[in-house]
Each structure stands twice: as structure tokens, then as C-alpha cells.
Image (spheres, rainbow, N blue to C red):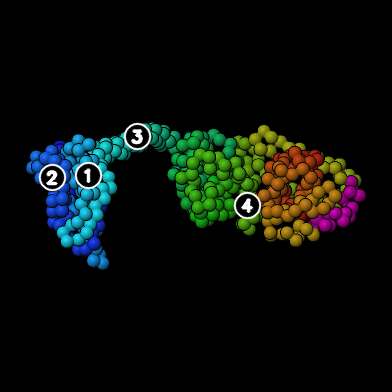
Amino acid sequence: MVIDPATTKYLIKAHIKADGIIEKSDVVGAIFGQTEGLLGDELDLRELQRSARVGRIEVELESKNGKSEGEITLPTSLDKVETVILAAAFESIDRVGPCKATIKTERVEDVRVVRRKQVIDRAKELLNQVIEEGKTEGESITDNVRQSVQVEEITHFGPDHCPAGPNIEKSDAIIIVEGRRDVLNLLKYGIKNVIAVGGTNIPKTVIELTKERITTAFVDGDRGGELILKELLQTADVDFVSRAPQTREVEEIPQKLIMKALKNKIPAEQYAEMYDIKIEKKDKSGPIGRIQSFSSKKEKREEKSPKIESIDEEKREELEDEVEIGEVIQEKEIKEDKKESEKIFTNKQENYSKILDDISGSLKAVLFDANNNEIKKIPVRELTDSLKKSKNITTVVFDGIITQRLLDIANSKNVKEIIGIKLGNVIKIPSSVRVITKKDLD
């Protein structure tokens, strides 16, 4: 229906029911005929139409099962009182053509109110659009400036021109990522000691750099990241492993997830042990000193002195192992006499050996109290959290590598014994915690 916006103020909307088949002309004729003279000359429909104070009567009918039903609409430019009188007059009609009929006025709609609501709704849409465009523009400016700084900061390091942060050359610790976009994302949050390998073919520049620096491999949480990590562990000298959340990529994750992933990094030896990856740990030498695990240094010493076991134990007063990271030097004095080195394991230690064999390959940990009663068995990944919350754990036997972080937590919670597969990259062993490895139990 076409409404003249210059003249229409109100819309009369009514519903009609008839006990027979009727047509639009029958309804219009009934309205004009049965309201004629009812409201006086001032509200006579024919005169009102001639003067354009009311519009054309619109009727929509539908016939079904021998009966008719539909809607009647009449636009008017009368005032409010005159319009409602005319609407009430519609309900006085009781026949349409040969059929009995009833008309019920449903509402009188103020066209200006409807238009005002439409204006308000549209204005809200436009305002939201303007605000969003303003935000986008503001973010675009910020991102453009930040990106330009990032592009200026990113460098190409070494003969292989690997994308890297500006601090890669002077930093004692480095982070290895997959590609250039990963470097840019870390630079965005102020992490500048980062370098990219650019795929599974690890550049020689990165391999050589890992020999001199404390290295963390930070890869995507997908299959590609897993493959790159395996090659890194086999070709480079990686100290720690960190991964983005599962199915996520380093280049897309926000600052909170980046910091969380780097904080939860695990020693490379432990990662390799968990996923059965064979790695050959190399000695590191360079500006920051030699980085070497206690166990690897011990093995190296034994290789150089194969006859050390034949030395008289009573004359061996002191053995010293040093692990240097930067300016941190740990000196461990070991004093053993012949009786102590040759004593038979206690029943408790034999029990630990049996438990360690039972959980081998399961990545489980078994917790004991002061009376050597088993408290519970948990996955290794939950071990540190369980120790932090515990009050009565005195012994831990687990299928994993004993790390510095685990020892520190155990010391703070009064844990007396830690029994694991082997000793990891440990700097200091607390005097109150006894460390036993599988090699000690064999």
C-alpha cells in the first residue's frame, strides 16, 4: 500500500470475517453504504475521500472452506479523535454482500510514531557504524605504527639471513621460532631475542648459535610444529621446549598465551624422553660459559677415566662437579667411604626400583607419605601442582626426568626423596632432598 507522507497521519487497521465467499468490492461497498449518514456530513467517507482527508480503502481477503477472512487498512489525515470515531464506525457493519460479517478494529497506528521509531533505529545503526569505523581507523593507525617499528627492528642474522630480533646477537638466551611472522608477533610484545628457522631444514646459522646460547624452541601446536621440533632436537643444541596451545600458531596467539607458553617450558631432555625422541646433547662453549647437565658431565668424566671404579675408595676424599651457566657455578662435594658405596639397598629402595619398573613408559607418578604408604598415582604433568597443594608427601617416584623446578618445589614442601628416570639440567640439589635415579637403583 502506498501512503502519502504529506497527508497521512494515522492508519486504521481492522480484521473482517464473513460467513461466505465475498470479494474486495463487496467490503468497500459495505463500508461506504453502512456508514453513510451514520457520523454526519463532517465524517462522511465519500466527502472525506473527495477532500483527500482519507485515502483509499485497502482490502486483503482469503477464502477457505466457504468462508472469507482478511485485513482492512484505511489511511487518514484526520485528527486523533475523528480517526478513532471512524475506526469505531467500522465495527457497526454486520453484513457484506449477501453474507453475515463482523469487522473488528485491531489498532489505530500513528504513522509519525512508526516513522520516528524507524528513524531512531536507523540512527542507532548509523551511529554504531561510525563508532566501529572510528575504532578500526584508530586500531589501524596504531597497528601501522607498531608494524613499521617491527619491520625496522627485524634483522637478518648470519650467512643464512635468518629473520631475527635486534637482540639476537648480544642476548645470552635465545628463542627459536618457525617463521618470519612468528618473529614479528614476538617483537610486537617486546620479545627481541628471537630467531626463525624458516621450515624443517634447520639453517647452519641457527645450529651454531644454539651451541653458545641458552636455547628455547617455541613452535606451533600443530603437526608442522612437532616435525620442526623433532628436527631441532636432533640437529641443534636445544635446552628447553615450549609449544603454542594445540592447533594454534605462534604468529596468531596474543601476549597472554605467549607468556604462559614460555613460562611453562620444559627441559628438552624431558620432552625427548616423553616422546621417545633420540637426541645427542652437545657441550656448549662461548661467551656465557659452558652449559652442561650434571648427568652428561658425569658420563663424560667416566668416559675419560674408565678405570675410576678401581681407585681405592678410602683414598677418594672428594669428587667435584661444576655446572656453569653465565656466572652461576655450582660446586657439589661427594664424600663416600667404601662401606657406604658397597652397602646393600634397603627394602624401601628395592620397592622404589620395582615401582619405577611398573610405571615405566606410563608417564605416571606415585606419591608416598612419611609412613611409606601410597597416597595416590597421578600423571607426571600434574606432579608439580600436586606437590604445591600437598602437606604430607615425603617421597615421589615418577616416570620422568628430575628437573630443577621439581627439586625447588619439593624442597619448599618438605619432600625428602625424589626417585626418577634420570637427572636433568640441574644447577643445585637441595641438601634436604635425596635424589635417586634409575641408574642408582640398577
Mark 4, residues whose alpha carbon is within 10 Å: few (<14), some, or many (≥20)? some
Frontmost residue, 42 versus 321? 42
Residue plotted at (79% across, 59% down): 354
Disc 3: which residue: 131
Tell me where residue 247 appears, x and y as whole percent. 50, 52
Kindly report the distance in space between the C-alpha atoms of the residues bearing marks 2 and 1. Answer: 15 Å
Residue 45 in the magenta stretch? The answer is no
Label whose residue precedes the other's in the sequence (3 or 2): 2
Instruction: Indicate the amino acid at tag 3.
Output: Ile
Disc 2: which residue: 37
Tell me where residue 112 appears, x and y as whole percent. 23, 37
Disc 4: which residue: 271
Label whose residue precedes the other's in the sequence (1 or 3): 1
Instruction: Indicate the amino acid at tag 4.
Output: Tyr
Magenta residues, as a range? 337-353
Secondary structure at badge 1 equals helix
Circles 1 and 3 in contact, beta carbons < 8 Å: no
